[in-house]
Amino acid sequence: MLNYFSRCSCGLRHLARIERRPWMRLFSSQRFYQCSACGKKQLASERAVNEAVFKYRSENV
């Protein structure tokens, strides 16, 4: 069984948002993402992902 609540070791900056399944809407603070590095699908906080992407982009300008 897949565990959408565990994160991959690639980091939040590699996550791309994908469409949630209906049952996932019970977790309103979580969004559904897929890692562009390893392909793992996972639920994560939209705020945390946005902060990780912003931090990565600001460090690599």
Image: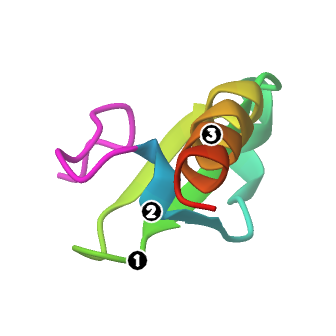
Type of secondary structure dominating the magenta stretch? loop
Q: Residue 54: give x, y in percent of width and height.
A: 70, 44
Instruction: Let me know if residue 13 is in the magenta part.
Output: no
State yes or no: discs 2 and 1 in contact (Cβ < 8 Å): yes
Mark 2 residue element = helix
Residue on which the image places disc 2: 14
Residue on which the image places disc 1: 36
Measure the alpha-carbon separation of dots 2 and 3: 9 Å
Q: Residues within 10 Å of mark 2 (few under 14, many from 20)?
A: some
Nearest to N terminus: mark 2 or mark 3 = 2
Q: Residues within 10 Å of mark 1 (few under 14, many from 20)?
A: few
Q: Residue 17: give x, y in percent of width and height.
A: 68, 65
Residue on which the image places disc 3: 49
Q: Amino acid at mark 3?
A: Val
Q: Amino acid at mark 1?
A: Ser
Mark 1 residue element = loop
- What residue is drawn where x is 82% and y is 26%? 28
Measure the alpha-carbon separation of dots 2 and 1: 5 Å
Q: Is residue 15 above or below residue 12?
A: below
Q: Is residue 9 above or below residue 34?
A: above
In the rendered view, does 17 fall on the left or right side of 3? right
Q: Amino acid at mark 2?
A: His
Q: What numbered label is drawn on residue 45?
A: none
Instruction: Let me know if residue 5 is in the magenta part.
Output: yes
Mark 3 residue element = helix
Q: Residues within 10 Å of mark 3 (few under 14, many from 20)?
A: many
Q: Which residues are magenta?
A: 1-11
Nearest to N terminus: mark 2 or mark 1 = 2
In the rendered view, does 31 fall on the left or right side of 37? right
Q: In the rendered view of the protein, which quadrant contains the C terminus?
A: bottom right
- What residue is drawn where x is 37% and y is 32%? 5
